[in-house]
Image: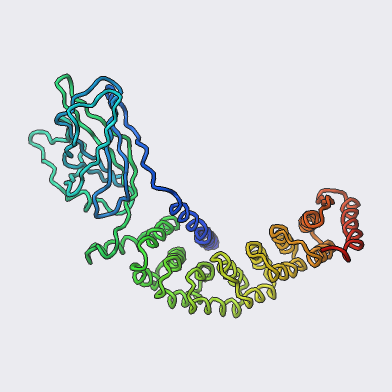
Amino acid sequence: MKGMKNHQNYRSRAALILAVALAGSLQLSTRAQEAAPTAKPVPQWGEAQGDIQAGLSLTGDAVMGDPLPLTCALKNMGAPRPLPGAFAWLLVAQGKDKAYFSAKIPLAVPAKLDGAQTLELPLKLAGQKVFAYRKDLAVVQGYPTAAAGDEVPSALGTLENLVPAGKVRLKCMVYLPAADGPLLLTSNKLDVLVGDPPLAKLSPEMRQALVQDLVAKFRANEYASLAAHGRAVKLGAGITPDLIAALADQQQPEFARMWLATALCDIGDARAAAPLVALLDDPSGGVRYVVAFHGPKMKNATLDAAIDAKAQASKDPMFAAWAARGFGTAGRAVPDAMVATTLAGSDARAKMELAKLLAANPGDQTTTTLLRLVEDADASVRHAAVQSLADGHVRSAAAVGALIAALDKPGDGARQSVCAALCQMAGQTWTYDPTAEAAEKNRVVNQWKDWWKQAAKDFH
C-alpha cells in the first residue's frame, strides 16, 4: 500500500508540473503562431519510379467534416512523359489497426510532363468515397481490386465524414498509364493532425460522440489528458458546460480534474468561475494549486476574491505561493495580503517561489519584500532572494546593507550568492568560494564589512 501511495503521489506531482509548465508554453506557442507568416509547404517526395517522383502535402487546416486540403505533386527528372489517363488514390492509416483507401481521384494534368518540370495538383476530395483496405486486395492497373470470386469492398462513407479528429497518416498513389509501361508512384508519408470542427456545425449525435471521446482522453493518463486540454481550449467556450459536467464526476482521476480545471481557466468562460471556486476546497492539493495558479488568468472578480481569501485563510503556505505565482505569470499585481501571508509563514518553499516571482516584477515594493526575504533564517530562501535582487539589477544602500548583514548568517551557498550580488552592485571582485579554507572565507566576509563601513555614507 505504501508503494502504491508513493506512485500515486508521483503521478500527482507529474501532472501538476505539466499543468504549471503549460501556462508558459501555451503563451509562447500562441505568440509564435500569430507571428509566423503563412508559408507555402515544401514538397516532400516519395521514392522515384524511373525518373518521376510523387509528393503529398497539406496546404491548409485539416478539420473533421471538411475535405482535406491536400496537394499532390509530380516531378519529372528525365525525358518528357505522357500523362493521359493519370489518376490518384489515397491510402489512409488511423492508429495501428485501421486502414482505408479512397476511390480514384481524377487528376487535371496536361498531355505530358516535360523534363525538369514539377506539377502541383490540388486534390478534389469533397464527397470522396472510402473503402476498408484488405491485405488480399491486389493492385490491378494501379488500383486495389478484389480477386474474382472475392467480396468487393463496399464504401464505408466519405473521406471527410470517416476521418475523426486526431492523427492520421496518408500516402498518395499516382498511376501513370503508358504504352511502354505504366508507373505506380508512391508519395511520401504525410502525418496530419485533424482538428475538431466548430461545435455549432455538429449534429447532436456528433457532438455527443465528440464530448465522450474528449472526456475519455482526459481520464486516460496524464499525457492524454494534456492533449485533451489543448483540444478543449481550441474548441472554446462552447465546450465549457461539458467540461464542468465532467469535473463534477467524483470518479475522475486527480490528474483529469487538474487538466479539466486548467482547460476551464484557459478558455476563460465566466460560467466556469463557480465550479473553480468550489475546487479551492478540493481534497487534492494538486487540484487546489492548479486553480490557484491558472485561475488568475481568467481575470474574474469572483474567482480572484476566492483565491485571495483562500490564500489568507489557508494553513497551506504553498497555496499562497502558487496563487502569487499565478497572478504574476498572468501579468497581474500580486495582492498585498497574499504576499504578507507568505512572508509571515514558515514554509521555505513558498518563500522561494515568492522570491522567484518577484524577480519578474521589479519595483520599490518588490525590493522591500526581497530585502525581508534576505533576512530569512533559511539559507535557501536567502539565496533565492539575493538572486532575484541581482536579476532585477537592484542597486541601493538599503539593498547593500541588507546583503552585508546577511553575511553573518550561516550557509556557504547563500554567502556565495550574497557576495556575487555585492560584486554586481558595488563593482568589486571579492567573490566567496565555498570550497576555500575557513580563513579565506572569513577574510572575504571581513573585507566586505570593512568596505561597507567606509562606503555606506556615500553609496547611492
Using the rendered image of the protein, determine whether residue 95 is visible from the camera's viewpoint: no
Q: Residue at x 50, y 73 (%)?
A: 283
Foreground residue, 227 or 13? 227
Lateral position of residue 101 relative to residue 457, left or right: left
Residue 308, image x, y percentages: 57, 77
| Outermost residue toward the left in this view | 149
On screen, residue 327 above or below 306: above
Foreground residue, 147 or 277? 277
Quadrant housing residue 85: top left
On screen, residue 442 above or below 177: below
Lateral position of residue 44 relative to residue 418, left or right: left
Lateral position of residue 316 relative to residue 65, left or right: right
Quadrant housing residue 92: top left
Quadrant housing residue 381: bottom right
Foreground residue, 136 or 177? 177
Residue 166, image x, y percentages: 33, 52
Using the rendered image of the protein, determine whether residue 114 is visible from the camera's viewpoint: yes
Q: Quadrant of the C terminus?
A: bottom right
Number of numbered discs overlaid on the protein picture: 0
Lateral position of residue 412 relative to residue 270, left or right: right
**Figure coloring:** rainbow
Residue 354, image x, y percentages: 65, 67
Residue 307, image x, y percentages: 54, 76
